[in-house]
Image (tube, rainbow, N blue to C red):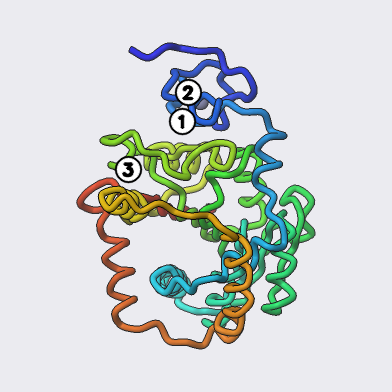
Amino acid sequence: MKQVKNISFRKCPFCDNQKGRFIINLNNTDLLRCENCSMVFADIPKQNVLEKNIYDLDTFYRYLQKEHLITAAYYDQILNKIIRHFKTPKLKLLEFGCGSGQFLLRAKRKGIEAYGSDFSPYSELAGKEFNLNIETKNIFETEYSENSFDVVFSHATYEHIYEVNAVTEKLKQLLKPNGLMIISGVPDFNLLSRRWFNNYHVNKPPGHVNYFEKKTIRKLFDNHNLTTLNISSYGIDIWFIKSKILSIFRKKNTPKNIQENQISKGKKNIGKFKNATQNIKFLHKVLALLYRSIGFIIPGKSIEAWAIKK
Ligand SMILES: [Zn+2]
């Protein structure tokens, strides 16, 4: 039986409980499972999380160094599903944690009225370079109006945020009644590479501080009176498989000038993203579908969750 600890720096992000069961220590931070609601989180001071999770302008180009066509296909599939849900693309969508704007670009291309929110400076550049409506502010200081969005979408962001409840409540306020809240791309804590090999890869504090499972995402929705439509686990831990294969051949990454290379690659690539006109090839569509479907068989790498504001 794992040791029960008093939570030192943070209350449980779901239920404010102050006791948790110790799981592991990563980067000098304890991962705890709340004794009350079973949410897993990093016990860490707020300041450390803020410092780590505000990204500078260079990050914009680093994210553009390679066009991930399977991710683009995945975004398109989510957007198609949203359009099918409302039976029209005449929608107002907010992406919370919009980063370098790739999802917003694809949403715009489908005829959706798309807005972004991100507190990192690199999003400002995404707004300028891609001509997107992006607010570079803390969500609690947003100028977007309450009850104004049909969809609030958030991808690979919820694992980074400190005040999970307050953010969720704020996003819910921005949604119209019957609006959709979609959380995707958050790592599934039950993924096999973690359970079998204790592998956390980049899924560590102070970057990642919340560790979701399907059951805890459902609780989050319940706590905020959002009606769950669907929660699924998808994807496989490609990074883990790759690192295992590389370790067989004893290849090591040489991080020589790696950052500068990433930035210059991103700068060269920007046109591709700007147009966002490329059609996703059949192969990438199929791969994205397979990637999303694998969670039906085994716990996947990430979770995708849909809820409705009643
Ligand atoms: Zn709790």
| Residue 39's disc number | 1
Q: Is residue 150 visible?
A: no
The residue singled out by tag 3 in the image is 191
Image position of 70 with respect to 215: above or below: below
Position of the N terminus, as image quadrant, is top left
In-image side of 79 versus 272 (left or right): left
Q: CA distance from mark 2 to mark 1?
A: 5 Å
Give the x, y percent position of residue 71: 43, 68
Query: Which residue corresponds to the image point at 61% horizontal and 69% vertical from the top-left?
Result: 101
In the rendered structure, which amino acid carries the disc numbered 2? Cys
Give the x, y percent position of residue 32: 48, 24
Q: CA distance from mark 3 to mark 2?
A: 19 Å
Marked residue nearer the N-terminal end (3 or 2): 2
The residue singled out by tag 2 in the image is 34
Q: Is residue 19 visible?
A: yes
Mark 2, ligand 1, within 8 Å: the answer is: yes
Q: Residues within 10 Å of mark 3 (few under 14, many from 20)?
A: many
Query: Which residue corresponds to the image point at 49% horizontal and 43% vertical from the top-left?
Result: 221
Q: Secondary structure at mark 1?
A: loop
Marked residue nearer the N-terminal end (3 or 1): 1
Nearest to the observer: residue 230 or residue 246 = 246
Q: Secondary structure at mark 3?
A: loop
